[in-house]
Amino acid sequence: MMPEKSVEEIIADLLSEDGVLRQSAESSLKDVSAETVLPELSVLLRSPEKRIRKRGMELFCCIGRDAVPSLALLLNDEEWMVRYRAAEALGIIGGDAACDLLLNSLQDSRDHVRYMAAKGLGLSLRTETAGAVAALLNDENEFVRASSARALGRMNLAAYAPRIEEALQQEKYDKTRAAMSEALIILGHDI
């Protein structure tokens, strides 16, 4: 019988390029307590390598709702890349607690985090967040405005079509205009 791997060894395997090794490590992850593995995953979100930060986010998602308290702490990190990946994981994990945290992230000083918070709320389909998401239709960043429009389209609330249309009339960027137009089509609003 092989000895059990340490958390550090499991994390190393989770980052491996070898798909079989990664899959085995993901199975092992289920046998490790969240309290033990979450601090290690938090370190991954601080990596200088984008691939490792992304993998760290995916691993938080594997943990699921048990990861939400740790992700809540990471939303206050001084590094925007950590907050961005934490918001991304919360959007994928979903649930009331995750959505409540994402609502606060709509006000983040960094546009990347606001973008991901709006996207996550759109994935949640929690229509009670639509007003806060709609406020981002006037954000200074075109990607945040596009993410807000997409989220509102996913929520399928026709009442927000006039606000999207108003933002569309003022929008300069083609890709953002396209996202807003798509949201209006989803909402059944003539353009």
Image (cartoon, rainbow, N blue to C red):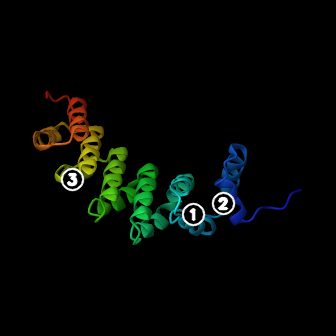
What type is the residue that disc 1 sits on?
A: Leu
Q: The residue tagged with tag 2: helix, strand or loop?
A: helix
Residue 71 rendering spot, x and y as whole percentages:
46, 64
Marks 1 and 2 in Cβ contact (< 8 Å): yes
| Tag count | 3
Q: Earlier along the polypeptide chain: callout 3 or callout 2?
A: 2
- Please give the residue where the numbered disc 3 appears in the rendered image: 136
Residue 31 in sight in this render: no
Where is residue 183 drawn, in percent x and y? Answer: 24, 35
| Up-down relation of residue 129 to residue 154 (above or below) | below
Q: Which residue sits at x=57%, y=65%?
A: 38
Residues 99 and 166: in front is 166
Give SS at disc 1.
helix
- Judge by depth and name the residue closer to the eye, 140 or 2: 140
Q: Residues within 10 Å of mark 3 (few under 14, many from 20)?
A: many
In the rendered structure, the answer to whether residue 153 lies left or right of residue 8 reads left
Mark 2, residue position: 11
Question: CA–CA distance between discs 3 and 2?
Answer: 37 Å
Name which of mark 1 and mark 3 comes first in the sequence.
1
Secondary structure under tag 3 reads: helix
Q: Which residue is drawn at 32% across and 61% down?
A: 105
Which residue is label 1 attached to? 41
**Residue 146 can be seen in this image:** yes
Horizontal and vertical percent position of residue 44: 55, 63
Disc 2 marks which amino acid? Ile
Q: Nearer the viewer, residue 140 or 118?
A: 140
Residue 114 has which mark? none
Q: Distance between the residues labelled 1 and 3?
A: 30 Å
The quarter of the rendered structure image containing the C terminus is top left
* The N terminus - image quarter: bottom right
